[in-house]
Image (tube, grey):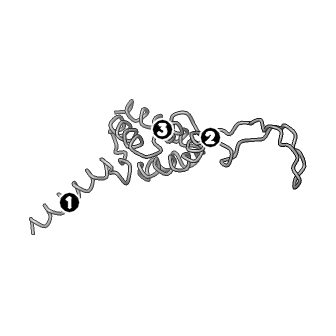
């Protein structure tokens, strides 16, 4: 009977270690008192993603904000009238590949942050609208806890 308890305890500890470390498929989990390590591991995990640069921008600088772009004159053809020069707001259809990746990375950045935190922190970031707001809220919360320790 004792062996089962030891094995169960060992299995539980191994599971906790795996969750804390993360993997190629999921980010590391934030554990109490380990924010500096988690922050470093999380950012390194982000850097391994195919769109890591865009994810990091979302987390550190906020989401991509589409800008107004100038659309050049389009000459008339037999099938359509001329379109004068005008401005329009960027959409994923007319963004550069870099801007599009940055624009699309926001939802994934939010998902990865939420995957890397537990329920006790989720309530703190639930009202946040961006990955950057979540990141900063977690940082404030963890700094507050380190001052209490």
Horizontally, is 52 left or right of 4 in the view? right
At 54% across and 39% down in the image, what residue appears? 58
Of label 2 and label 3, which has the lower sequence position?
Answer: 3
Q: Which residue is mark 2?
A: 96
At 35% across and 47% down in the image, what residue appears? 28
How far apart, in angstroms, are the residues tagged by discs 2 and 3? 15 Å
**For the residues carrying marks 3 and 1, which lies nearer the camera in this image?**
3
Q: Residues within 10 Å of mark 1 (few under 14, many from 20)?
A: few
Q: Residue furthest top?
A: 147
How far apart, in angstroms, are the residues tagged by discs 1 and 2? 48 Å
Q: Are marks 2 and 3 in contact (CB under 8 Å)?
A: no
Where residue 5 appears, as percent x and y from the top left, is 15, 64
Q: Which mark is residue 11?
A: 1
Q: Nearer the viewer, residue 35 or 85?
A: 85
Q: Which residue is mark 3?
A: 53
Horizontally, is 101 left or right of 43 in the view? right
Q: Identify the image quadrant of residue 31.
A: top left
Q: Please tell me whether mark 1 sits on a helix, a strand or a loop.
A: helix
Q: Are marks 3 and 1 in contact (CB under 8 Å)?
A: no
Of label 1 and label 2, which has the lower sequence position?
Answer: 1
Where residue 95 appears, as percent x and y from the top left, is 65, 42
How far apart, in angstroms, are the residues tagged by discs 3 and 1? 36 Å
């Amino acid at each position: 009977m004792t062996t089962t308890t030891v094995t169960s305890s060992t299995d539980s500890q191994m599971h906790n270690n795996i969750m804390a470390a993360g993997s190629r498929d999921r980010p590391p989990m934030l554990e109490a008192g380990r924010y500096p390590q988690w922050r470093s591991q999380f950012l390194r995990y982000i850097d391994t993603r195919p769109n890591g640069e865009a994810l990091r921008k979302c987390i550190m600088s906020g989401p991509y904000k589409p800008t107004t772009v100038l659309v050049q004159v389009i000459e008339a053809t037999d099938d359509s009238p001329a379109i004068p020069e005008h401005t329009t707001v960027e959409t994923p259809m007319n963004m550069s590949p870099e801007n599009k990746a940055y624009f699309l990375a926001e939802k994934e950045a939010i998902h990865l942050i939420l995957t890397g935190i537990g329920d006790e922190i989720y309530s703190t970031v639930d009202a946040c609208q961006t990955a950057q707001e979540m990141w900063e809220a977690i940082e404030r919360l963890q700094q507050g806890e380190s001052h209490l320790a």
